[in-house]
């Protein structure tokens, strides 16, 4: 077997496909009789779109959402022919043929996109599938009510587009008490009534926890499948999927007053044992975690980051461990079990979505479980 330099990476990721599948099944049960679709945009939130999508497909998931055409084109040949792949960001002008030829389903977000797609379909003499998105109050993607009324009455559109889904997106779904959820739901229902008989989709992961009135026919779940907190309601966090470890590349003891790292920001106030880890901000481990805001874990002991996070490495304070317990070549946890992606996000002043999608390309990636495990 060829030499595998990946085994010597500064960090390693474990992606638990069995936990992913369990989360997908829990969400499916939560939204039933609606269907739980998988949102696998941005490389399945950084976890690897192909292994994640294959595992979910084998677990029975048949509806997938990506953000961009290129993501759909990469995924399409990997899934069974009857799996549906929707392109959330819609179609840039000129991309119609590529989308249609690949059998991808665009989400039409503007009247221009909708009429271009209808026009293109008419030119091919073929009714082409699409989803239609309403802006129900988030003011990001989707059409205003008046544009939807115009489309519903436009024979070019109705004759040439096969509407598979009518959708919108919630701005505050993670806050169950937000009045905006109910306001958006009403606006969505009113818009959906313009297209009777078309399956409906409003909920993301957070929406899945808001009750049946939000489920429609298809829930579009991303973060909850990947173990991130989706809702402030009890049970709003499912099983962790990701474990991240960093390699100890060096250890040293620094004397009182010695500076550590860029800017010498950390100053030892006593003789201090320091370990240098092979993970830095180029691996998605945010500089915001420096200065003790973030930490590593070793057998349940918290080891705070000492000083700034560098590009390829960072230093941690080993003071909480007996000398010799952690040595060069050992591994410490950065994301593990109870110390999960939401804790890291809070420490970094961001959200779990950004922690996951920032995970770098340099980690050794290990896929566990999922009917084939490491072989996939
Ligand atoms: C990203 C996205 C989702 C998934 O959101 P989660 O909060 O990760 O479940 C669903 N719908 C749309 C339109 C999205 O952009």
Image (tube, rainbow, N blue to C red):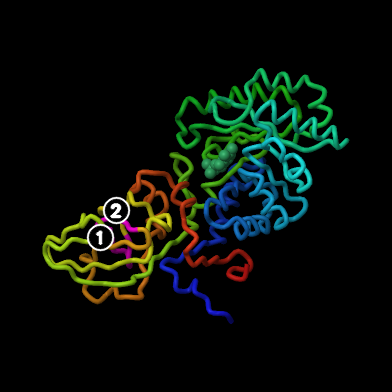
Q: Is residue 166 in view from this perspective?
A: no
Residue pointed to by mark 1: 261
Q: Is 153 colored magenta in this rendering?
A: no
Question: Label 1 neighbourhood size at 10 Å, few (<14), some (14-19), many (20+)?
Answer: some
Q: Is residue 320 above or below residue 42?
A: below
- The foreground one among 103 and 337 is 103
Residue at the extreme bottom:
1
- Picture residue at 58% right of the left edge, 44% below the top: 221
In whole angstroms, how far apart are the C-alphas of marks 2 and 1? 10 Å
Q: Nearer the viewer, residue 214 or 249?
A: 249
Left or right: 148 with respect to 333? right
Q: What residue is shown at x 45% (from left), y 30% (from top)?
A: 177
Q: Does dot 1 land on a helix, a strand or a loop?
A: loop
Residue tagged by mark 2? 290
Image spot of residue 2 (x, y percent): 57, 80
The residue range painted magenta reads 296-310
Q: Is residue 309 magenta?
A: yes
Q: Are marks 2 and 1 in contact (CB under 8 Å)?
A: yes
- For disc 1, does the CB lie below 8 Å from ligand 1? no
The residue that appears at 41% across and 49% down in the rendered structure is: 342
Residue 104's place in the image compared with 58, above or below, is above
Q: Is residue 181 left or right of residue 219?
A: left
In the picture provided, is 112 more to the left or to the right than 236?
right
Give the quadrant of residue 199. top right
Instruction: Pick out the residue farthest to the right.
Output: 125
């Amino acid at each position: 077997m060829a030499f595998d330099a990946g085994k010597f990476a500064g960090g390693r990721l474990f992606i638990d496909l069995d936990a992913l599948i369990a989360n997908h099944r829990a969400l499916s049960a939560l939204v039933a009789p609606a269907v739980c679709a998988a949102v696998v945009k941005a490389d399945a939130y950084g976890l690897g779109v192909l292994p994640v999508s294959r595992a979910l497909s084998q677990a029975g998931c048949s509806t997938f959402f990506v953000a961009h055409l290129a993501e759909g084109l990469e995924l399409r040949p990997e899934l069974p022919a009857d799996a549906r792949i929707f392109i959330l960001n819609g179609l840039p002008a000129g991309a119609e043929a590529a989308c249609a030829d690949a059998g991808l389903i665009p989400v039409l977000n503007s009247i221009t996109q909708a009429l271009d797609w209808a026009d293109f379909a008419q030119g091919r003499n073929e009714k082409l599938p699409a989803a239609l998105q309403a802006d129900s109050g988030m003011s990001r993607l989707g059409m205003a009510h008046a544009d939807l009324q115009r489309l519903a009455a436009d024979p070019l559109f109705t004759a040439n587009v096969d509407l598979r889904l009518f959708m919108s997106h919630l701005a505050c779904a993670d806050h169950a008490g937000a009045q905006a959820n109910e306001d958006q739901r009403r606006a969505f229902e009113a818009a959906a009534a313009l297209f009777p008989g078309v399956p409906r989709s409003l909920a993301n992961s957070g929406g899945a926890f808001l009750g049946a009135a939000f489920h429609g026919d298809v829930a579009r779940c991303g973060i909850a499948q990947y173990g991130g907190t989706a809702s402030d309601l009890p049970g709003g966090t499912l099983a962790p999927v990701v474990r991240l470890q960093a390699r100890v590349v060096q250890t040293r003891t620094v004397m009182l007053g010695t500076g550590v790292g860029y800017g010498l920001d950390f100053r030892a106030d006593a003789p201090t044992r320091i370990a240098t880890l092979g993970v830095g901000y180029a691996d998605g481990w945010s500089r915001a975690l420096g200065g003790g805001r973030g930490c590593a874990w070793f057998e349940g002991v918290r080891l705070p980051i000492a000083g700034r996070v560098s590009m390829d490495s960072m230093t941690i304070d080993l003071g909480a461990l007996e000398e010799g317990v952690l040595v060069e070549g050992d591994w410490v946890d950065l994301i593990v079990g109870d110390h999960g992606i939401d804790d890291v996000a809070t420490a970094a002043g961001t959200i779990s979505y950004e922690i996951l999608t920032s995970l770098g390309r340099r980690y050794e990636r290990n896929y566990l479980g999922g009917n084939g495990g490491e072989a996939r």
